Image: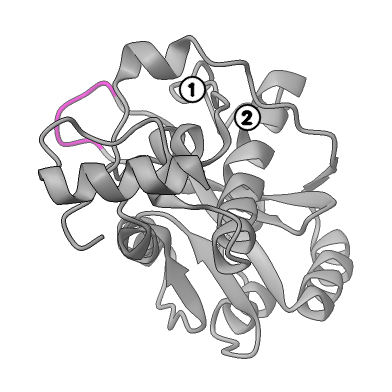
C-alpha cells in the first residue's frame, strides 16, 4: 500500500456526526490542584496533549500559551497557564520520557511555550508523522479523526478568548476533546483497528494496483 493515500474534504467532514465526549473535565488553576493532577497523569503513563493560545488579531502581536490540556482515556485536565505559568512540576512532567505524550503539531506548541521559559520535552509522539504509516495524507486533527472514526470535531471555539476569567463549558469541552482525540487515535491505530485499504476516503488518483487491493480487502 505504498502509494495508497487517504484524505477527506472539509465539506465531507462537516456532514459527519459530531464527536461525543463523555470523559470528566477538571480545570487546574492552582499549584495544589496541579500537583494532584500531574500525579494522576504520571500514573497513566500515556496521555493526550494539546494547547490553546488566545488569538491575536494584530499583526506581529503574539500571546503566550493560555491553556495546556492533558488527557487520559477517561478524564482531561485543563491547566490554566495564563494563571499558573509554566511551573517546575509541569516542566518535569513534560520532560519525563517514561510518560508518552501524544500530540499534533507538537513542535509548534513548544515554539509558543518557549516564550514562557526553557522546556526540554521528552516522550512525545507527533501524530502528523505517526499517521503516515496508515496512508493518511491529511495533517489536521479534525480530518485525521474524521477519516479514522467517521466523526466531526467541532472547531467553533478555536478563536475564543482562552485567557478569560472563567472558561465556558463549551470552551472546556472543545479543549478536552482535542487532547483526548490525540490519545484515542494513537491507541486505535496502534492496536491495528484501522485498515487503510478498506477506507472510503482513498484518493481517486491512487494507482490501479492499489485500487485492486482495496477491492479485495472490501470483499474479505
Q: Quadrant of residue 198?
A: top left
Q: Is residue 32 above or below residue 25?
A: below
Q: Residues within 10 Å of mark 2 (few under 14, many from 20)?
A: some
Q: Is residue 154 magenta?
A: no
User: Is residue 53 among what the camera can see?
Assistant: no
Q: Is residue 59 magenta?
A: yes
Number of marks in picture: 2
Magenta part, dominant SS: loop
Closer to the camera in the image, 24 or 212? 212
Residue on which disc 1 sits: 155
In x, y percent, where is residue 189? 54, 60
State which region is magenta: 57-61
In x, y percent, where is residue 81? 60, 52
Whole-number angstrom distance, CA of label 2 to CA of label 1: 8 Å
- Closer to the chain start, of discs 2 and 1, is 1
Q: Secondary structure at mark 1?
A: loop
Q: Residue at x 39, y 34 (%)?
A: 143
Closer to the camera in the image, 75 or 18? 18
User: Is residue 50 among what the camera can see?
Assistant: yes
Q: Residue at x 54, y 23 (%)?
A: 152
In x, y percent, where is residue 26? 84, 45
Residue on which disc 2 sits: 174
Marks 2,1: beta carbons within 8 A: yes
In the rendered view, does 208 fall on the left or right side of 126?
left
Name the image quarter holding the N terminus.
bottom left
Q: Is residue 73 above or below residue 190?
A: above
In the rendered view, does 68 fall on the left or right side of 35?
left
Q: Secondary structure at mark 2?
A: helix
Q: Residue at x 32, y 18 (%)?
A: 10
Closer to the camera in the image, 1 or 159? 1
Amino acid at each position: 500500500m505504498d502509494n495508497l493515500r487517504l484524505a477527506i474534504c472539509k465539506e465531507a467532514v462537516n456532514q459527519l456526526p459530531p464527536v461525543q465526549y463523555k470523559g470528566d473535565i477538571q480545570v487546574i488553576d492552582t499549584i495544589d490542584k496541579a500537583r494532584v493532577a500531574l500525579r494522576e497523569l504520571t500514573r497513566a503513563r500515556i496521555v493526550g496533549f494539546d494547547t490553546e493560545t488566545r488569538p491575536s488579531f494584530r499583526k506581529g502581536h503574539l500571546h503566550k500559551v493560555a491553556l495546556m490540556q492533558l488527557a487520559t482515556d477517561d478524564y482531561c485536565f485543563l491547566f490554566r497557564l495564563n494563571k499558573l505559568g509554566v511551573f517546575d512540576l509541569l516542566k518535569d512532567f513534560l520532560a519525563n520520557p517514561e510518560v508518552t505524550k501524544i500530540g499534533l503539531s507538537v513542535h509548534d506548541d513548544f515554539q509558543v511555550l518557549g516564550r514562557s521559559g526553557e522546556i526540554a520535552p521528552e516522550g512525545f509522539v507527533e501524530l502528523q508523522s505517526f499517521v503516515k504509516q496508515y496512508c493518511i495524507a491529511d495533517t489536521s486533527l479534525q480530518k485525521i479523526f474524521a477519516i479514522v472514526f467517521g466523526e466531526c470535531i467541532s472547531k467553533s471555539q478555536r478563536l475564543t478568548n482562552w485567557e478569560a476569567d472563567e472558561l465556558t463549558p463549551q470552551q472546556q469541552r472543545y479543549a478536552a476533546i482535542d487532547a483526548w482525540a490525540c490519545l484515542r487515535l494513537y491507541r486505535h491505530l496502534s492496536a491495528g483497528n484501522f485498515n487503510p485499504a478498506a477506507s472510503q476516503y482513498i484518493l481517486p488518483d491512487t494507482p490501479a494496483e492499489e485500487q485492486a487491493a482495496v477491492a479485495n480487502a472490501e470483499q474479505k
